[in-house]
Image: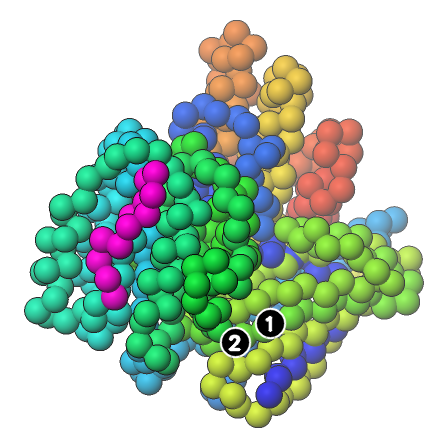
Amino acid sequence: MVRFFGITFSLLFVFGCASTRTASYRYAQKQIEGGDLDFENRLRVDEYVNAFPQEDLAKPKAGDDLALQVDYFTDFLPKGNHTTLAQVAVRTRVANASEKAKKFGISLVLDNSGSMTEDNKFHDAIDALLAMITELADGTEFALVVFSNEAQVAIPPTVVTRQSRETLKEEIKKLRTEGGTNIESGLLLGYKTMSQFSKGTQSRLLLLTDGQSNVGITDPKELAKKAGVQYLEGSRISTIGLGHDVDEQLLRTIADKGRGAYYFAENATALKTLFRKDIESLMVPIAKNVTVTIKSSAGTVLKKVYGYDQPIKNNTLTLEVGELNSDDWRIFIVEVEGKDKSILTEAMASYTPATGKSALTRTTSKTVVEAGSKKPQLNKIVARNAVIFSNALTLIEVSKLDKAKKYKEAEDIVSVQLANVEVARSLDKSAELAKESDNLRKINQVLLEKQGSKTEAAQQTTQAQETSSLKPLIKSALSLAEKSIPGPWSLVIGLISLALE
């Protein structure tokens, strides 16, 4: 049985990844701390935005599995520019007690190659794994496969109990590193081991590695075939990159084809947090086969959906989101341009309930007010996410300018974005936004040093605490934005300026 949720709105400003998919943001933090400005080929805008808590997203009503929410950046169209920004979010409910009580199985595939000894990565992995065993619920099935040149089963499928928990920990403590990195062998044996879990078990495979390896097989069905077992319907493969030199493209591909998620963890603390906060959500599916279809109405053009490469045909784009778990979400960004005084676009999300409930259809509509009809009102919730979105675009553009040794241009862009962040901070006092401000200052300092300057004069705009003092800077930034990063980044600045009138 399939459920449908429909929604009509002017434009989708979509941040397209889940709450559990935050690899780009976490990796960017590590780069910033090390003064590494190579963001262009690593940073994904959708993951960057979804790394931030989204507690303001609407939760499903009682009896519903999924909620849709539309919020415009402002309810006002800029004069002469019929492009505006909005945020559309899909969020699932929290799993109930009976769903959490179902049988779960985790097949963890751990890289124990020699490179894992660098920077204490193997020690961090073991430390986090021991903590994970401590916190796994009784009745969970657990298996551990390790791989270097070849793979071997370190712990066969075992039910976690008070008695077996300590035995599992002792076996984990015996593990040592050796040899090279053969990810394919680990995946194949991990998949075969996962197939040995009890019938009806909700199975998940987690691949944890620091290495780079040419994996010829990433599709679960092909893995199952080569492993000599049946394809496990409903099983998922997620990947965790540990350390600075992981092959992100490879691990993303494995996770995408395995309908799982790709994570980045820089150390034991990050791994423990990932296991503690994300595994439970990862294990309990709420909505399966989730599909979001976006269609612009007559007089409008669907320009782009960030985080997705699918072609837009006949002003329509269909996104295969896959499975959403307990208290999971997607925030999508779409850029839409309209010829009329107000813009209207349609979207629908459909899914198969994990519980098999009956179908339900729900429709909501919002229209952006035409230019000049009333004073604009800034949506504080979406303003924060819009600024975070433009932060990600800023990092990518800085990376390009840095490679071209155009340090002054990069510095100017960072200074403007710092002002945007200060506007957002006047609306949202969260630690996350304070961290964004701090990150941009660090990047600015790196750019100043590359110009041979130690002064911090270029960072003086970050001292502003009142929104009113930022108006002149925001307005003057518009001309720079049009020259440097035209499009969504400059549109964010323009809307902020408009809303501050």
Labels 2 & 1 near each other (Cβ < 8 A): yes
The residue tagged 2 is: 287
- What x and y, as percent, mark residue 242? 36, 40
Q: Based on the picture, tell me whether residue 234 belongs to the magenta stretch.
A: no
Residue 450 in view (yes/no)? yes
Question: The residue tagged with tag 2: helix, strand or loop?
Answer: strand
Q: Based on the picture, tell me whether residue 152 belongs to the magenta stretch.
A: yes
- What x and y, as percent, mark residue 186? 37, 49
The residue sitting at 57% across, 67% down in the picture is 322
Q: Which mark, by number, is residue 278?
A: none
Dot 1: few (<14), some (14–19), or many (≥20) neighbours within 10 Å? some
Residue 190 relative to residue 127: left or right = right
- What x and y, as percent, mark residue 162? 10, 70
Residue type at numbered disc 2: Ala
Residue 98 relative to residue 427: left or right = left
- What x and y, as percent, mark residue 279? 34, 62
Residue 77 in view (yes/no)? no
**Which of 447 and 256 lies nearest the eye of the viewer?**
256
Residue type at numbered disc 1: Val
Q: Quadrant of the N terminus?
A: bottom right
**Residue 280 lies in what quarter of the image?**
bottom left
The residue sitting at 47% across, 63% down in the picture is 224
The residue sitting at 66% across, 36% down in the picture is 474
Residue 464 relative to residue 133: left or right = right
Inter-mark Cα distance, 2 to 1: 7 Å
Q: Which residues are magenta?
A: 146-157
The residue tagged 1 is: 290
**Which of 98 and 72 lies nearest the eye of the viewer?**
98
Q: Say if 406 sits above or below 218 in the image.
A: above
